[in-house]
């Protein structure tokens, strides 16, 4: 069967909550076979348990029927650890979903470019790191980036940012080297996964986190400084959410994303822009020092309150005129606004 995106088999690097979430929607919605690779056996086991939990929950809530759920689960296979990246040689596209660490991603993409066939798309789920830098790492040392082979190698790298928690939106990011064909296929694949695709330039944090992280960071700064919580008496609601007032709170979002991930994103933003609004708060750094990462290691954010409802994927919509959204502003306790300036 001809598939517009050309992806019949997907590889996913990383069996954390993001990797498993991507594997799940790809198997369920795009109906493609998925190979998952993670160097940690424990992470694989936890990830598969999470997938089974997601499937059971969706069936119980009537979102999918049991037959479709079982078919999706059967499409997901784990790559044996001893095979490494070689176990992904037959995939048409790989999505990397590992930690927000540039050197780690560069090393992985350099290896993937050597192992996978030359037509395979190399996608990163990074939420802040430069796709151009990642693409450059795929070019072997003996090749020039200006050579035809060097250009072809880097042209298949693209950013495909599935949000965490996973809403309907996906952010598509082109490196300077990314080809139009790669962009088109990546977009078609995300749509096949049931996502609404929007594009961002390759700038630190792209759009979503460039907007979201200052809210999270300033909240941490003011909490650490014992500033009154009443000034945060506002919420933003978006069209992909029922207008029920049940939008995720600040604590829920941060706990799901992971405090360590939030810190890594803010460090990337601060280093990439030099803008002080992205400088991570001491409180966030200390919570990460304490290994308080959020739900990924069994906890929420200490001291966080409900009512600070900022949603990463929905905040991103304000930057795109082609996407209509609704802002419902609730009264501020402080006339200076949430930023206090």
Image (spheres, rainbow, N blue to C red):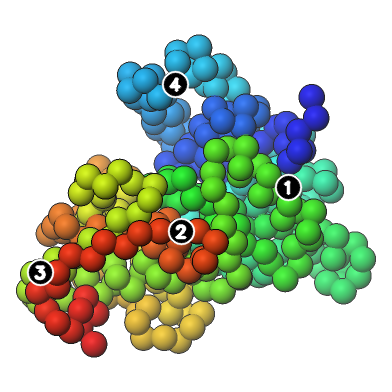
Residue 124 at x, y percent in the picture: 60, 54
Identified at 42% across, 56% down, the residue is: 313
At label 3, counting other C-alpha atoms closer than 10 Å, the crowd grade (few under 14, some 14-19, many 20 or more) is: some
**Distance between mark 2 and mark 1 Cα atoms:** 25 Å
The extreme right residue here reads: 148
Circle nearer the viewer, 2 or 3: 2
Q: Is residue 144 left or right of residue 25?
A: right
> In this picture, is 89 found above or below 303?
above
The tag earlier along the polypeptide, 3 or 4, is 4
Residue 27 at x, y percent in the picture: 58, 29
Residue 65 at x, y percent in the picture: 45, 15
The tag earlier along the polypeptide, 2 or 1, is 1
Q: Are marks 3 and 4 in contact (CB under 8 Å)?
A: no
Mark 2, residue position:
324
- Residue 64's mark? 4
Mark 3, residue position:
229
SS type, badge 4 = loop
Circle nearer the viewer, 2 or 1: 2
> In this picture, is 255 found above or below 273?
above
The tag earlier along the polypeptide, 2 or 4, is 4
**Distance between mark 3 and mark 4 Cα atoms:** 40 Å
Location of the N terminus (image quadrant): top right
Circle nearer the viewer, 3 or 4: 4
Identified at 66% across, 36% down, the residue is: 10
Residue 110 visible? The answer is no
Location of the C terminus (image quadrant): bottom left
Mark 1, residue position:
185
The tag earlier along the polypeptide, 2 or 3, is 3
């Amino acid at each position: 069967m001809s598939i517009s995106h050309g992806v019949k088999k997907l590889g996913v690097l990383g069996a954390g909550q993001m990797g498993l979430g991507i594997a799940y929607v790809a198997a369920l919605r795009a109906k493609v076979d998925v190979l998952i690779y993670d160097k940690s056996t424990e992470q694989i086991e936890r990830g598969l348990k999470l997938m089974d939990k997601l499937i059971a929950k969706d069936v119980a809530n009537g979102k999918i029927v049991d037959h479709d759920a079982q078919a999706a689960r059967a499409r997901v296979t784990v790559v044996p650890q001893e095979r490494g990246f070689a176990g992904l040689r037959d995939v048409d596209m790989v999505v990397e979903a590992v930690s927000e660490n540039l050197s780690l991603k560069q090393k992985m993409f350099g290896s993937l470019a050597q192992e996978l066939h030359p037509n395979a798309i190399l996608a990163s789920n990074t939420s802040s790191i430069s796709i151009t830098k990642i693409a450059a790492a795929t070019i072997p040392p003996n090749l020039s980036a200006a050579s035809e082979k060097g250009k072809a190698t880097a042209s298949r790298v693209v950013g495909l940012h599935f949000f965490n928690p996973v809403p309907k939106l996906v952010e598509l990011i082109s490196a300077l080297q990314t080809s139009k064909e790669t962009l088109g296929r990546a977009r078609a694949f995300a749509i096949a996964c049931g996502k609404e695709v929007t594009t961002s330039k390759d700038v630190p944090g792209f759009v979503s986190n460039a907007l979201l992280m200052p809210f999270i960071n300033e909240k941490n700064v003011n909490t650490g400084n014992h500033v009154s919580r009443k000034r945060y008496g506002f919420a933003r609601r978006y069209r992909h959410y029922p207008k029920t007032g049940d939008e995720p709170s600040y604590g829920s979002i941060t706990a799901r994303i992971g405090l360590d991930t939030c810190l890594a994103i803010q460090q990337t933003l601060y280093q990439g822009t030099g803008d002080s609004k992205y400088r991570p708060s001491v409180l966030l750094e200390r919570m990460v020092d304490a290994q308080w990462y959020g739900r990924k290691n069994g906890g929420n954010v200490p001291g966080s309150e409900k009512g600070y409802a900022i949603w990463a994927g929905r905040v991103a919509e304000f930057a795109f005129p082609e996407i209509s959204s609704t802002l419902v502003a609730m009264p501020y306790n402080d006339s200076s606004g949430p930023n206090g300036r």
